[in-house]
Image (cartoon, rainbow, N blue to C red):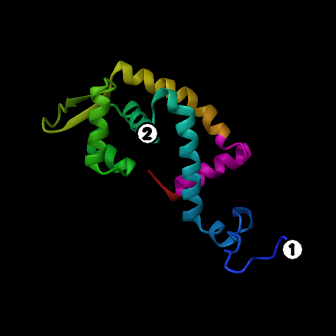
Amino acid sequence: MSPKAVRPGAKPAQPSETSLDLRALQRTPGFMLRLAQLKFFEGFYEEFAALGLTPATYAIFVVIRDNPGVPPSSLASLLRLRLPNLIKILNELESSGFIKRNRSKSDRRGVELMLTPKGAKLIQDGASLTGLYNRKMLAPLTEAEQRTLLELLNRLLPL
């Protein structure tokens, strides 16, 4: 019996990932963006694990750092998070001493988010890793292609 012959009743060999025809998926922007997101998130977890930052908490810290006093509802809308999910994260960040909630001076019913010194230090440490991380993840692209990629993504996803 030759090595390629299949015994009766045996299952045929499964094609390997490298032998699958993925051309249709490679022409599907949503699928490719999802794979890129997964790749970037996997890399993020590896690079930022020592700081305890996740992609979501990193984004929350950056928005609060750059927009002191941002209300939770604006943060949730911007980051496409459901408000109850964001509130859970904010509760954890507040109990850990990274953020504080203040009553709005203009609307006493409103809440404003601020970083504590501990939170400011954490995002400063995280930001120091960001440039190196982005260069590593975008290494297959030239600097011009990297700028173009960001320009195109910002055009597709205006914030």
Q: Position of residue 12 (x, y in %)?
A: 70, 74
Q: Which residues are magenta?
A: 137-155
Taking 64 as reference, is 154 above or below it?
below
Quarter holding residue 92: top left
Residue under the image location 27 percent in, 27 percent down = 95
Task: Indicate which disc, 2 or 1, sits on the residue closer to the N terminus.
Answer: 1
Q: Position of residue 141 (x, y in %)?
A: 72, 47
Secondary structure of the residue carrying tag 1 is loop
Q: Is residue 110 left or right of residue 26?
A: left
Q: Nearer the viewer, residue 23 or 13?
A: 13
Label 1 crowd bin: few (<14), some (14–19), many (20+), radius 10 Å: few
- Predominant SS along the magenta part: helix
Residue 59's tag is: 2
Q: Residue furthest top?
A: 117
Residue 155's tag is: none
- The answer to if 81 sits in the magenta stretch is no
Residue under the image location 42 percent in, 42 percent down = 56
Amino acid at pointer 2: Ala
Label 2 to label 1: alpha-carbon separation: 57 Å
